[in-house]
Amino acid sequence: MSQKEELLAEAQWRTAWALAHAFGHLWANVPEVVCLMSQVADGEQSPSAIRQIVSQVVAQEQDWYPGLMAPEVCRDATGAVLVVHTSGTGRVRWAVREDGSATIEVCRPDPWGVVLRATIGPASYAGSQRRPWEPDREVRLEQLGPFAQRHLAVLARAVAAAVAAEQA
């Protein structure tokens, strides 16, 4: 029995793509997938469709190398669809919810674990009440352990990508 294909909501797709693009994931840097950004609508993007497009491009092009072929999807305890990623080193991980909000964590080896966390909410300001210099999305930062400048730099790169996703 096959499992039902998970479809990504537009806000979720945009935030997940922006994070993956900022971190050089193959699926978010193939031109044919980039073109989907202008055509995306709620419930139209599935990880398997993205994987199929990327596989076709990689098979035809000598310059592409194997990499992350599609976003990884799972469900949280409430049954909501999440796009998740953990870097190869385990130092950076994120989860993107259907409304485009995300949690990004920077980790260090034991005994520290998660040392920095950013929680990025969906658009939270009413259009007429938001001042031009205020962000479109609420960002909450937490320090949970000792960190170095490189940890803060990677978190800043991820936050900038996720916040900019709404404007894509």
Image (tube, helix red, strand yellow):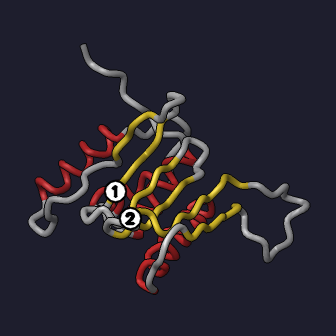
Q: Residue at x 35, y 59 (%)?
A: 28
Tell me the amino acid under the disc marked 1. Thr
Q: Residue at x 47, y 69 (%)?
A: 115
**Front-most of residues 77 and 128:** 77
Q: Which mark is residue 86?
A: 1
Residue 111 on image: x %, y %: 35, 66
Q: Quadrant of the N terminus?
A: top left
**Front-most of residues 113 and 92:** 113
Q: Are marks 1 and 2 in contact (CB under 8 Å)?
A: yes
| In-image side of 55 versus 140 (left or right) | left
Residue 154 on image: x %, y %: 43, 76
Residue 96 on image: x %, y %: 50, 49
3D distance between C-alphas at marks 1 and 2: 6 Å
Q: Quadrant of residue 89?
A: bottom left
Tell me the amino acid under the disc marked 2. Val
Q: Residue at x 55, y 54 (%)?
A: 102
| In-image side of 37 versus 132 (left or right) | left
Reading the image, the residue beneath label 2 is 92
Report if residue 94 is visible in the image.
yes
* 151 w.r.t. 34: above or below: below
